[in-house]
Amino acid sequence: MKLVPVPLDTLPTVESSFAALTWARSFGLDGTSAPVAQRPTAVAVGAVEADEAARAVWADGSIVAAAVEGRAREHGLTLGVFPEEYELASVAELVAGDAPGAGASGPGFASLLLARREQQLLLACRPRPAAQAGRGLAYATFAEGVAGLRVLAQGGALPEIAFVADPAESELLLALAGQPTLDGGPVAGGALAIIIVAGDAGEAAARLETAVARQGLGGRECGQNVARAWAASRYEVPRVARVLAASGIRIATTSSWHPWSSFPAALELDPEPGTAWRGRQVLGVGPHGALLLTRTLS
């Protein structure tokens, strides 16, 4: 099987006007002045070939995931798992770290690995969906939003994207998304959930309505604007981290999996000493538990 270099083809994105240093200084951190880093262009290093019969792609481990997705899309396929680092990280790095998809339900990037052949990886793909439908939901508390995701996961109505952010993380994500207009007004200090369903034309919208109508899900509907805005800006956090790092300010992201029974205790843990800001997000949702992602600013 002869492999050839692949052109880079990233997902459509938008440049953010978010002022990272101003945001960090609002929490008492005074970094040095530094130019705002634009999102760098990833370079495709290596080669990739689609295997349409297997719905998979062979790719050099060094190639950036965005380039692999670009070749997969030429054949009507998609990786379907897009971590925040997707535009810059290699597929080998994402597999090794088992990076979760940004806001995604279910397992992380390592679940795509089917086989290895020297320096090449065989990654599972799926057919590209014909349509997507999304919605934002506002909750009074983070715990209520987490309980809503559990209802979806254990009720058989879990969308491909389903995550909830605590008040601090919600404020950051909305700022990165350009402060989209929310139906019913702002989140006002509460938690924000985003759910996005993919499928055939008509199917996605129907599945979304089923998920939103699920008894016990709760939350106030915020409309589709917030889901669209988040989807267009979901790779901005790594850019913000680079800007802050250049100024001597660190934003760290960690995650840990918890069964649903232990989430109440996990949500009550205090921030680490020396943390100027903390934001949390629950993603990687499944019927048995989910990931608790924590960002800290120091």
Image: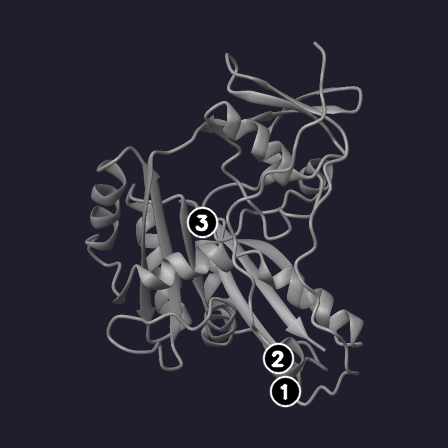
User: In the rendered structure, are the residues bearing label 1 and label 2 in contact, judged by CB atoms less than 8 Å apart?
Assistant: yes
Q: Which residue is mark 1?
A: 27
Amino acid at pointer 1: Phe
Residue lying at 71% horizontally and 81% vertically, measured from the top left: 273
In the image, taking residue 272 as reference, residue 46 lies left or right, namely: right
Quadrant hosting residue 277: bottom right
Above or below, 193 against 156 in this view is below
Which image quadrant: the N terminus?
A: top right
Amino acid at pointer 2: Trp
User: In the rendered structure, are the residues bearing label 2 and label 3 in contact, judged by CB atoms less than 8 Å apart?
Assistant: no
Q: Nearer the viewer, residue 35 or 177?
A: 35
Residue 204, which numbered label?
A: none
Q: Nearer the viewer, mark 3 or mark 1?
A: 1
Badge 3, how many Cα within 10 Å: few under 14, some, many 20+?
many
Badge 1, how many Cα within 10 Å: few under 14, some, many 20+?
few
Q: Nearer the viewer, mark 1 or mark 2?
A: 1
Q: Which residue is mark 3?
A: 285
Tell me the element at label 1.
loop
Quadrant hosting residue 15: bottom right
> Alpha-carbon distance for marks 1 and 2?
7 Å
Q: Earlier in the sequence, mark 1 or mark 2?
A: 1
> Alpha-carbon distance for marks 2 and 3?
25 Å
Amino acid at pointer 3: Val
Residue lying at 25% horizontally and 70% vertically, measured from the top left: 183
Tell me the element at label 2.
strand
Q: Which residue is mark 2?
A: 277
In the image, taking residue 154 as reference, residue 37 lies left or right, namely: right
